[in-house]
Amino acid sequence: MSVYTWSAMILAHSRLGNAEDGLKIFDQMLQQSSLKPEENVFVAALEACATIPSLAEGQRVHKCIMEHNLATNVNIGCALIDMYTKCGNFDEARKVFERLPKRDLVVWNAMIATYSHFKRIPEALRLVQVLQQDRLKPNDVTFGAILKACSRPEDLESGKHIHAHIAQLQYDTNMAVASSLIEMYSRCGNVEGMNSVFHKLKLRDSNVWKSMISGFTHLGLASETVKGCVMQMQEQAVGLNEAFVPLLKAFHDASMFDDIRRIHACFLGGHKLDPVVGITLIEIYCKDKYFSDALAVFNKYTCKSLAMWTSVIIGYTQHGLGQDALLLLKQMLQEGTKPTQDIILCLLETCCNDADLNLGEQIHSHILDSSLKSNPRVLKSIADMYERCGKVTGAQRTDQIMSNA
């Protein structure tokens, strides 16, 4: 086996909850293999030690790393810092950091995360200043690591201090950092702080919306999220659709379907529904089997884009509604829009047994009248469909067409 295979096996066991077995594989490699362990193997073994967590095993692997003269490797250094942190040994983590001759941002972030883990926030913030002196720029991971240290109401003042530091460095409008700030204020039970961060942002992605929604839900104020979002939609004149798409996705991730409908209804009350928003709604409604809602959105548009047709037809076929999808395909053709390869392949895949043969044959007849009739992937899918439906002659005939194409 190659070094990469050994490391993959160790990682797989560790991430599937069998970290002890992962370390046994590490020992097996050392004893049985003629291969020299490399960076990937040691990183995998250290992750296993951190997962258990076992300081004794971690120290044993660390000793082996030193014997192979890899203690100054940056990636191994990060893994050592993480292992010692998760095993509760701050001093050893700091020693590893201090002994590294070269430190990239990943190493700095690992050490900042260590200080934060041990609630040493002032020192973590000092490290942020030092890394900048080292001509590096902090990123969302840097600040996210520090903010995780503030997890209780009694940590609020520390959280505000970190926020002030972030604002001073002008990172508070970075959406990833803003999401971490919102989550911190939520954990500390401070709604005012959440709103302050949220309203300072000119643009908001789905992660920002998700942080607000989960934060209000955590505080038992989920309805406040809906009210706030609706109010903003009613007041905002520009960029409404850009805000609406990530908002919908965030509500969907939180399984807040009634609120999706409520905001959807409010939006339709006074605004033109952008096609991108319509497609998002169709996909969300189809994914959760609210087909009448999906169709209602779809039918709102007099001019339907190809992407919209694709969303609704694939949404129906993925839930076994092949006949309904076929009716939509016919409507699509009548309105002069040609189906894509993805639509046809998805329709054919829904035909799984002899009961679906008639549907499959109807789809095939539509293909014969289209430019896809000689498409190799479509022909292969037709042959597979006939085979699944038990019509061997149809499959054979399609195979012959493919061989002659």
Image (cartoon, grey):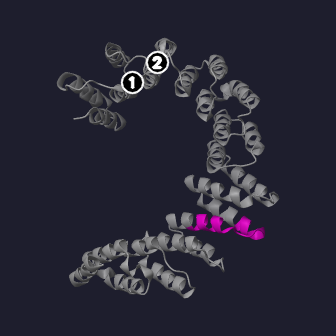
Residue at 30% of width from left, 76% of height from top? 385
Left of 386 or right of it: where is 54? Answer: right
Dot 1: element: loop
User: Which label sits on residue 53?
Assistant: 1
Q: Majority secondary structure of the magenta segment?
A: helix
Q: Looking at the image, which is closer to me, 150 or 73?
A: 73
Residue 299: % across, % down? 62, 78
Residue 367: % across, % down? 40, 83
Q: Which residue is mark 2?
A: 88
Q: Looking at the image, which is closer to me, 107 or 278?
A: 107
What amino acid type should be assigned to the residue bearing mark 1?
Pro
What amino acid type should be assigned to the residue bearing mark 2?
Gly
Q: Quadrant of residue 150?
A: top right
Q: Looking at the image, which is closer to me, 225 or 56?
A: 56
Task: Evaluate if marks 1 and 2 touch, with contact meaning CB atoms under 8 Å apart.
Answer: yes
Q: Quadrant of residue 34?
A: top left
Q: Is residue 390 above or below residue 45?
A: below
Left of 390 or right of it: where is 118? Answer: right
Is residue 151 in view from this perspective? Answer: no
Residue at 65% of width from left, 77% of height from top? 301
Residue 140: % across, % down? 62, 35
Q: Which residues are magenta?
A: 265-282
Mark earlier in primary sequence (1, 2):
1
